[in-house]
Structures are given as C-alpha cells and as structure tokens.
Amino acid sequence: MSRRVMLVEDEPNITEAIRFLLIRDGWEVETHADGTDAVEVISSAKPDLVILDVMLPGKSGMEILTELRARDDLQGLPVLMLTARGQSRDRDLAEKAGVSRFMTKPFSNSEVLTAVRDLHAQATQT
Amino acid sequence: MASLNVLVLVCLGYVALLFLVAFAADRLAATGRSTWLRSPLIYTLSLSIYCTAWTFYGAVGYAARSGLEFVTIYVGPTLVMIGWWWGLRKLVRVGRSQRVTSIADLISSRYGKSNTLAICVTILAVISVTPYIALQLQSITLSFSIFAEADPNNSYNEIASVFWVAAGLAVFAILFGTRNLDANERHHGVVTAVAIEAVVKLIALLAVGIFVVWGVAGGVTDTMARIDASEIGQWNIDRGRWATITFLAAAAFVCLPRMFQVMVVENDDERHLRTAAWAFPLYLLLMSLFVIPIAVVGLDLMPEGANPDLFVLTVPLSQGQQGLAMLSFLGGFSSATSMVIVAAMALSTMVSNHIVMPIWLSSRGSGASVSGDVRSVVLLARRVSIAVIMALGYFYYRLSGGGAALAAIGLIAFAGIAQILPALVGGLFWRGATRTGALAGLTVGFVLWLYTLLLPGIGGEVMPAVVMENGLFGLSWLKPQALFGIDGLDPMVHSVMWSLSLNAAAFCVVSLFGFPSPIERLQAAQFVNVFEHSAGPRGWVGSVAQSEDLMIMSQRILGAREAQVFFHAEAQRQGGRGHLPEPTPMFLQRLERELAGSVGAATAHAMIGQIVGGSSVSVEDLLAVADESAQLLEYSSQLEAKSDELSRTAHQLREANEKLTQISLQKDNFLSQVSHELRTPMTSIRAFSEILRDTEGLQPDEQTRYATIIHDEALRLTRLLDDLLDLSVLENGQVNLNMGEGMLAEVLDRAVSTAMTGASREMRILRNETNERIPVHSDLDRLTQVFINLIANARKYCDATAPELSIRVHEVGGKVVVDMIDNGSGIPRDSRKLVFEKFARVSAERAGGAGLGLAICREIMQRLGGDIIYLNGHQGAAFRVSFPSGYQLAAQ
Amino acid sequence: MSAEPEIDPGDPGQVSHPPVFLERQGYRRRRLMDAARLLPLIGAGLFAVPLLWSGTSETEAPYSLSSAIIYIFGVWAGLIVLAALFGYGARRLGRSSDVPGPEPD
C-alpha cells in the first residue's frame, strides 16, 4: 500500500524537517515550494495526503485548498494545513474551505505524525 | 296552615343543604375530581343569578302594572347571550388571559392598571348594587310577612327578621366566598350552590305557573281568553321604555359585578359559552313564560289593593295550596340569597383589592415583603367588606322604609351599572380608548345618573322639590327630569339617554385628544387583539399551566429563543426531564430578574404576580409600574431633545470608528505578519531540536547539519527581533540621531566592506571615487546601515550570472543623491511600490530576511530629512537614496 | 458535531400563512360564524317589531295581549333553537378540524 504525501511548503528548513520525520515513518514524500502551480502538481502526483502551508508565494494555501475542493477528483483528498499566522479567523476560513485538519506552527513532531496517520486512516476507511 | 316557625325551619334546613352542597363542591374541586362541577350546565345555571327576587316576585308585579314590558328585562340578556360570538367570547377570553378578578379589575387593567379607575368603578358598583341588595332583603321580609299574617300566634318582627336574614347571608358569603385566596378567584362551592338555587327557583315558578294555568284558569285557551279580557289585556307599550329597558338589561347583564363574577371570573372553560348561548335564554324564557298568566289570574282572584309583587305567593295561598306556596317561597328565597351572596362576594373583591389593600399597603410603607402576611390581610379585608356591604344594604332598607320606592330601584341600579358599558366596550374593541377617556366618561355618566335618576328616584326628600321643579340653582335647563329643556320623556328613558350618550361622548372625545401611557398601550393591544395574543380555549390545569403561561409571557418579552433556552436550563437545573420547570419560588425569582432586565423590576414583578397568583401583591406593584412608565416617558422626551446632538456625535463617532477600524486592521495585519515571521524560524528550531532529541542513530554529519539549522534559525530570530525593535523605535520617533561629519566615500567604503564580508558569491562594485568626495553632516552610522542594507539586498537578489552593482553619486542643490543599480532582472513593476512596506515579499526565494530591511531604510532616511525610492527605467534593481548634505542647511 | 434539531413552536416567524382558499370544512366554519354574528341582529330586529304595532290611532283596534305573547315567545323560542343549532354545528366542525385557522375578528 502506497503512502505518499505531498508537502507544499516554501520554507526549506521546515520542509526538510517534515520530510525527515515522514520518511522515517515510512512515507513517500514529495515536496513543492510554490503556490502558483501547486494544484496542477498535486493533481498529477495524486498523493494520499497533502500538507499545505498557508503563506505561499504565488497563491495562498486557502486558494489552493478551495480549488482542490472544487475538483471532482480531489474533493476527498485529506489536507493538513499549517499556518504560522495563528489567527482564529484563518482557522474559520480553512474550515469553511473544507480543510481536513488545521495546525498552527510551531508544532510538535509527534502531533504532525499523529495527524498525518489519522487522516490517512480515515481516508482509507471510508 | 304552616306556622312561621315551620317556615323558619324550612329556611334553615334549605340553607344548611346549600352549605352542605357548597362544602362538598369545594372539597371535590380541591381533589380535582370535579369534572361535572365544571360542566356547561353548572355554568349556565350559575348565570341565573341574573334572576333575583326582584324578577322572581317583581316580574309578576311588573306585568300586573305594565303588561308585557317586563320581558324586556329578559330579552336584553337573551340578545347578549345569542350574540356571544361578538362580545362575551372576547370578554371571557380577556378575563381569563388577564386573570381579572372583577369588572373593576378588568377596566383598571385595560386602562394601564389604573387604580383610580378601579376605585371609580368600585364606588359606582357599590352605590348601584347596595339598594339592589336592600331590595332582596325586602323581598325576603315581605314573603315572611305574608306567612306571618296567616299565622295565628304572630310574633313576627320585620326589623329583626331583616337583620337576621342579612346576617345569615353575610355569614354564608364569608364562609364560601372567602375561604381561601384562589389565584383565579374561583369559588366552586358557591357556584354549585347557586346552580342548585337556580333549579329551585325555576321549578318553583314553573310549578306556580302550571297550577295557575291548568289548576285555576282551566287550560291554555282559557288562560289566553282571560289575559285578553283583563285590564292589561291590550297591547299598549311605551316604545321608548321598551327599547331603553331592553338595551339597559343587556348592558347590565354584562356590567353587573355579580354577573361578571359568574360569567367571566368563575368561567372554567370558554367553550361553556357555546352551551350557555342557547341554554340560558331558554332558562329566561321558562322563567317568564307564566308571568303574565300569574299576574292576570292574581288580578282576578285577589282583592283590590293586594300587592301584585307577591302574587306568586298569595295566589297559591289563597287557593289553599300550602305546599306550593312553600315551594314558591323557597324559590323567592333562593333568588334573593344567591344574588346577595354573589353580589357581596364580587363587591368585596373589588373593595378589598382596589380600596382597602392600596390603603393598607401604603400605610405599611415598606411594601408587601411577606406574602403570607398579605394573604391574611386580604382575606380579612374581604370578610369585612362583605359584612360592610350587607350592613349597607340593611341600613339602606331601614332608611328607605321599604315599600314601593324600593321596587323601582332595580331598573335604577341597572342604569347606574350600565355607565361602565362605554369604557368596557370601548376597551375591548378600540385600541385608542384611554384611561382619561374612561375616567371622563364614567364621571359624566355617574353624575348624570345620580342627578337625573337615583336622587329623584329613591324617594324621600333627598332631592329637594324646588330643584325638581325649577332645576338646579333655578336654571330650568338643569331640571333633573328635563335636561336641556327636553321635556315629556319617561324619566327612565330621559336619564339613560342623557347619561349614556354623554358618557360615551366624553369617553370618545377625551380618548381622541389624550395620549396613553406605554403600559396602557400595551394593555390595549392585549385586550383588543386578545385572540392573537392568547391561547385557544382550554381548561385551567394547575401549576403546569402556570409555567406554560409564564413561558408564553416570557417569550413575548425576552424573545422566543432566549425564553426557551432559559426555561430549558431551569428545567434541567431542577432535574426534571420536561421542557417546562416547576414554578418554584427560586425559579420565579430568577425569571423575574431575567424579565426585569427587559421591562423593569416593578413590571416584571407584577407580570409574574399576575400569572402565578396573588392579586394581593399586584396593587402596589401596579402603582410602581405606573411610576416606571412615567419615568420612561420623561426619559424619552429628554432623549428626543438631545437627538440632534446625538446624531452629530454619532456622525463623528462613525468617522472615528472608521479610522480606528483601519488602524486596527493594519495592526492586525502587522501582528499576524510578525507572528508568521516569528513562528517560522521557531518551527524549524522546534522540529529539529525534537529530531535531535528523539531520533536514535543519527549520523554525526546529520547532527551537525541540524544543529547548524537550529543555530541559523536562532540567528534569524534575533535579527528579526532587532529589526522589529529598530523599526518600532524609528516609527515612534524615539530615535536619537547621532549627527557627525564625514566624507560620503568613507561611509560607502565602510558599507561595502561590511556587506560583502562572508559573501558566498562575488559581486563587482562599480564606484566613481571622485564624485564621492562630498562632505556630509548626518548620522553616519544610520546612513551606513541603509547602504549596507541596499548592498546586501543586491548581493542576495541579483540574479545575473556576473552580478554587478554600480554606485553613482551626485550632488544637486545641497542634496546628495546616491543611486545603487544592479544588473539583475530587477523588481517586477507591480511589486515596486510594495518593497518599502513592512514584511514585503517580492521574490519567491527566501533569503533569511524578514522583509523589514527596506522599511527600516525608509524610516531612517525620513528621519535624516531625505528619502529612498525605487528608480524606474533601469533594467536591474535600482534604488535612489537622497539626503541633505547638511552644510547648505547650516549656511542658510 | 451533532446539533439538536431546534423546535420552535413559539416563534411567530414560523407560522405559515393561511391559504387563500379554505377547504370546504373551513369555509363552512366561517359561514357558520357569520350566521352566529347575524343572529343577535335578527333577534333585535324581531323584538323591535312590536314597537310598530301598538295602537297608534284610536280608531284601530289595539292588538290583543295574547297575540303579542305568542309573537314574542315564538321569536324567543326560534332564536334559542337557532343558537342551539349553531352551538351544535360549531362543536361538530370544531371537532372535525382540530386546527382552526386564525379567527376572523
């Protein structure tokens, strides 16, 4: 069973940390640092799960999420959203846009791992 | 021949039976198994207190004098009953939904709970009804005397018997009318006793009638022949009286306190009206069916000068029908007692609620804090009121001396009580009716009735003959029975016409010009639109209904959702499973507080009091309500006066608010960006330190690499904090400029060397040293900081394969201009105006900066009296820094 | 998230507007009410009729009291029967349609 994660994050150090964690947990990780073409990249890669930063160059995480949810093939894709802005308004917006899980930076590594596992488990169950 | 003693024994036995019935009914009602007590039949029969001794005995006398005119007394109520859909239905619904205790209470609560109005109605009722009670006492005494005359060993004392009759009735009324204080003022015992009496008087009259028609006259046709042959055998009526008395009887039927008591207050179920609508007219029809035959036969049989008012008794007696006469006597006795008891009860409620209690409460000063205390006072007040009313009736009887003058009092009382009609009907159907209008109408009607009918009518020399002849003060247009020169009318018609029409006119005109208080308007809506505001017809069921009513009321005040949430929470707090809490004192207190927030404390208290019971506390509360609404009115007028000022202030506030919103928005954005910039390095630091801590078997080079990342990110954090502090200091204008002298070339040298140290990439710097020989007077350190920033940016972002930065300097008119232009691809056009904003992010690449550098540069240059701009028209990134050299300024 | 369904019986905003055309039952009910309203007016009119008879001129023979009695009590009985019929009808219709429309007042 493939366990592939697409990580869309523009901060190289954070990308590296998450990548390190997930690979050690047995995931296949692809990364992308730009918002502009993120939707196309995701739809062609067809990962099992997406980790999405909110503040991305080119196109914000919110916009990307909305576009994902508007597409038939990506509607049910689990999306874990990360933000460093830490405002409750962002959480509301994300929930409205159809986020699966919303987390604030800085996070603990175990939190991220648990969230990714949970989301994946939920998606495969249903 | 029945002796007087037997008669007295029969009376006592009958009263004892009534006691028993009333007692049993009260017990039944208390246990709640009394469904038949609440049947439409009992309700209909209880309405029969309309037929008093005046109608039982007097109708025959009336017929003997004026023929068929007596039926008008019954036709009026018949029309009211069959028209129940128009009026009575609304009256009963209002009475039930407002929990009124008497007609005075109804009028008072309709007109903003005005106690003045209640007092007026109470006084009017007492004055009208007291002679009426005297009339009942007289009829009982007269009927006694008939038997006494026939008794050989006659020891009959009229005065004593009146006294004992009055005392006995008072005791009965006190015992069953004031046994307890029911929240709804219902008295099942009394009502049941009244119903029994209704049956007795109907059977008695029917029995006498049947005896007369078939026993004496010899059948229906013979009776009819006798009727036509008698002295009243011709159809000859006074049309004015016919119409007037019909109308008067209809009005009195609704307005009489005792009728209001049984019809509205004692009503258990609105649907009973549907049955009573035909059953009560039937009762009236049966009551009047044999009146003419009895009168005609009486006139035939009895000697000249016999009192026709007592034909019902004397005709059977003259025929030797002792048993029938006894039955007839009981019928008359029933009529009198039931009327007196209910009337005394109704009047005592009014007197105690609207006159005694307010006085008592205000004399106590501190107010009704102990409810048990108040209850006992109310009961005492009622009992005393009943005794006083009966005493008044007794003394009135003694003073008037009985006789024929008293017989006329029935219609006079009707005319008096009918003065309430305009205020009542107006209150039920016209929202514009006001308290002052009602007061004016009542006063006008009352005075006119007193002057044109009561005083001339009660006999004696109450109204001096001079006034009767020549009018008050000798003014002929003020003659009591010919007001405004309208002469020749029947006194009754004359008085009713003037008093009621001027009453109604005053009521309407004053209402039209007045302005009602808020609570008055609230009540007006509640009354006139009662069918929209109140629940459908349903029986009264104990305490759950109270919670329900509280709920309905609270919804109106708090709003449906809030009220439901509140009630639900309370129900859960009480541990119940239902949606409605029990009306415990705790809950009521909390609800009251909740309501007080919306409508004021006194109103809330009165509202809850009205539903949960204890009309005893309402009087004082209602006074407080009046005060509150008056304050409200005053307050609102002040507000109106200030409205101009307020609107101006509001405008200013709006503008200020817009500014504040903008500022707060900017601040929000800034804070969320700061948060982002702080959290990003912290995220890396946390993630990698956890990796270092938790991961086993990391390679040494991995460890080094991750530690380096942590170190770099920590530095980035420090830089960010420095920049933020720097920016904050600059923006707040708290910076101290450290002005100094130096050559521009030296400043640039220092900047270039600082910016290029540790550079991983070579960049060529093109300079023209000769142009840079400009002496400057400025804060040289700050200036250096700006240049370092620009050079470092070029180093970081210039994307040319062989990066070059040319620094061009010239001096124009005391202004030093330094351009820094690289050979990269520059900044996209639409981002150019953003680069100086805080946290501006132009490129996708992250280079460890937070995006504060250029913002700081601009702040510094502005402090130094210069500027920094982006230069358009160059291929690469081009910044121009300009500032005053300082010397020209000093020379000027 | 399990939001309880909100039952809001007291909210006037949820009261549906009455239909323009009533069903037959409702229509009968309204007409019955009209009749009930009419009844006292008819009664008052009929009871006022005797005002027209009384021996206005001396030449005319005055009406006999017995015929007046028959007329008055006849009208009276008729009104009672009509009121009873209305009461019965209202009860019957009231029972068959438990949810009465807003009463036209």
Image (spheres, coloured by chain):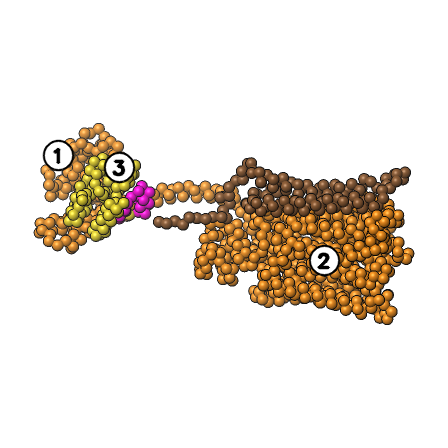
Chain colours: A yellow, B orange, C brown
Circle 3 packing at 10 Å, graded few (<14), some (14-19), many (20+), is few
Q: Quadrant of the C terminus of chain B?
A: top left
Instruction: Tell which subunit mark 2 falls on.
Output: B
Give me the residue at 22% from left, 28% from top.
B873
| Residue B650 in view in this figure | yes
User: Which amino acid does the dot numbered 1 rest on?
Assistant: Pro
For badge 2, the amino acid type reads: Ala
Q: CA distance from mark 3 to mark 2?
A: 87 Å
Residue ID for mark 3: A73
Q: Is residue B750 magenta?
A: no
Give the mark, 1 or 2, whose residue is nearer the N terminus: 2
The chain that hosts pointer 3 is A
Residue assigned mark 2: B198
Magenta part of the chain: A87-104
Residue at the extreme left of the image, as rendered: B700
Query: In the rendered view of the protein, which quadrant contains the N terminus of chain B?
Result: bottom right
Helix, strand or loop status at disc 3: helix
Check if mark 3's residue and mark 2's residue have beta carbons within 8 Å: no
Disc 2: CA contacts within 10 A as few (<14), some (14-19) or many (>=20): many
Is label 3 or label 2 in front?
2
* Mark 1 closeness class: few <14, some 14–19, many ≥20 residues within 10 Å: some
Question: Is residue B294 shown left or right of residue B29?
Answer: right
